[in-house]
Amino acid sequence: MINLTPITAADTTTTNSSSYIWMIAIYVLIFAALYFFLIRPNSKKKKEEVELRNSLEIGDEITTIGGIMGRVVAIKDDEDAIIIESGSDRVKMKFKKWCISTVDTVKDKPADEQPEKKSFFGSKKKDKNKITDTASAAEADIEK
């Protein structure tokens, strides 16, 4: 038998509106995933590269994107360029700052500037060696 009950307009509008809401929610989730997996890491990397290039000092050992290794002997901020000295015959070459791949000079950071350990979700990581309970601290003193 065929069911011939009439479909009312109220039934179709609620079904359509809820399907539109789910469709929009899926698109929002896709764009959020693209942002967090593609756009945000790329912008962080660019920010670190700019910071690396702006923190150059005379005497730093660098490697260019072409593989040339040398020591910075001059920095020309007005031209956005550096002059490096390379090889045993001390050949001087002028490069733009954007061609710097890595800075090979190790710079020590003060203890205050070292970043805190963070967990995967960005919250502060708990130190496993640190005893926070007073009861645990008392037990630790007894054991010693």
Image: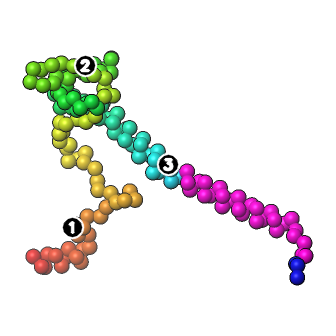
User: Between marks 2 and 3, how big is the CA–CA gap?
Assistant: 37 Å
Q: Check disc 1 and give the amino acid type.
A: Asn
Which residues make up the magenta segment? 4-31
Q: In the rendering, which numbered label is found on residue 143?
A: none
The residue that mark 1 highlights is 129
N-terminal of the pair, mark 2 or mark 3, is 3
Near-viewer residue (109 or 71): 71
Q: Is residue 19 left or right of residue 80?
A: right
Secondary element type, mark 2: strand
CA distance separating discs 2 and 1: 51 Å
Which numbered mark, 1 or 3, is in the foreground of this view? 3
The residue lying at 38 percent from left, 56 percent from top is 122
Residue 54 included in the magenta stretch of the image: no
**Image height check: is 100 above or below 27?**
above
Residue most extreme to the front: 1
The secondary structure making up most of the magenta span is helix
How far across and how far down the image is residue 126, in percent?
29, 64
**Of the image marks 2 and 1, the number of the one nearer the N terminus:** 2
The image quadrant of residue 103 is: top left
**Mark 2 vs 3: CB contact within 8 A:** no
Q: Residues within 10 Å of mark 1 (few under 14, many from 20)?
A: few
Name the residue tied to disc 3: 35
**Quadrant (top left, top right, bottom left, bottom right) of the N terminus:** bottom right
The residue that mark 2 highlights is: 94
Single out the mark in the foreground, 2 or 1: 2
